[in-house]
Image (spheres, rainbow, N blue to C red):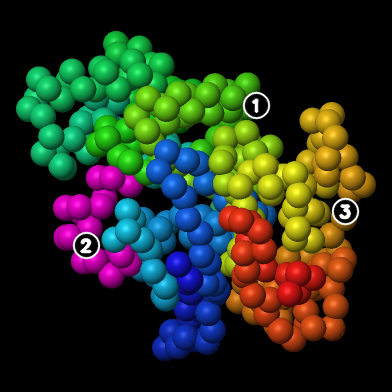
Amino acid sequence: VNLTKHFPIKSGVFQKTTGHIKAVDGISLFVKKGETLGIVGESGCGKSTAGRTFIRLYEPTEGKILFKGKDISHLSESTLSRTVRKNIQMVFQDPYASMNPRKTLKSILSEPLITHQLYDRKGRDQKISELLNRVGLNPSFINRYPHEFSGGQRQRIGIARALALHPELIIADEAVSALDVSIQAQIINLMEDLQEEFSLTYIFISHDLSVVRHISDRVAVMYLGKIMEFARKKDLYGDPLHPYTRALLSAVPAPGKRGVENRERIVLKGDLPSPASPPPGCVFHTRCPAAMDVCRKVTPKFQELKKEHFVACHLYQ
Ligand code: SF4
Ligand code: MG
């Protein structure tokens, strides 16, 4: 709720703070249990920072993070690790980067179980084979090293590691972006099966609107640290209200059906402004085909226009 994460920009010999990168600037979102929330936007829009702030890998500058109704935004690290950490896991774009190359698959997957003191040695081995089976990897691989696996297999390992602690929420940041399209589909199908089996809730962060469309129940569109539009999937893709959402959707190849995706392509002018000095008023006004005078001065409110369909744009205020 109103979540904000600004990073100080330091310069000079004394490292004085000379400004702030407004990576996440007052966003409000929710996801219900068992659902998938997709967060889309161009690179640099703040979606990864948002994901990391949700699980307190970054301290929020302002605002609240509610997990099952409980405000976790100011819990101490020790309280967090006792309570929430186990329940919220993250899957990254390149799981290889977060795996120690000198450790075997077995020790990579044992780590979270040991940290949280789950199972004895024998129980752990059993748990690991179960996990590997479940993500479609042969349990006989357990003495292999990360470099022996393909990108898709590593992502399966990343998912197994996230699942080890039986989390309720998994935040996936560009989890399939580095993979070939056919492998992407396999990983997404796996994630969907696991979601059903374990009643998982997902926050799926991606720059790819087609992938997000496939997997999400709700979608939030981010631009320069702010949410432009947030709605249930069918409303967002079927009846996009925000000029930025419309532009993004117009660039997605049409699945060959009726609706907005067959409209003419809207090409945005100009470049993405820097999040260190976002434009005043509506942050999108420098590129918006519908910009009006008011857009240059006044920040549009993020309003619920229809049921569970939120938009921040002066066209509707
Ligand atoms: Fe465009 Fe104005 Fe709406 Fe911003 S507020 S998206 S500039 S019309
Ligand atoms: Mg990112």
Residue 132: in magenta span: no
Pick the front one: 110 or 134:
134
Residue type highlighted by circle 1: Val
Q: Give residue 272's position: percent from left, percent from top.
A: 73, 65
Residue at the (56%, 41%) spot, across then down = 217
Tell me if label 3 and label 1 are in contact, CB under 8 Å: no
Nearest-to-viewer mark from 3 and 2: 3
Q: Is residue 4 above or below residue 86?
A: below
Compared to 79, does 312 lie above or below? below
- State which region is magenta: 71-89
Distance CA(mark 3)–CA(mark 1): 25 Å
| Residue under label 2 | 77
Q: Secondary structure at mark 3?
A: loop
Residue 82: in magenta span: yes
- Real-space Cα distance between discs 1 and 2? 38 Å
Which residue sits at x=47%, y=78%? 8
Mark 2: secondary structure: helix
Query: Which quarter of the figure has residue 179?
Result: top right
Report whether residue 202 is seen.
yes
**Given the current orientation, which residue lies at the most extreme front position?**
307
Residue behind mark 1: 181
Q: Earlier in the sequence, mark 3 or mark 2?
A: 2
Assess whether mark 2 and mark 1 are in contact (beta carbons under 8 angstroms): no
- Point 54% across, 84% down: residue: 19
| Amino acid type, label 2 | Glu
Which residue bears the numbered disc 3?
Answer: 266
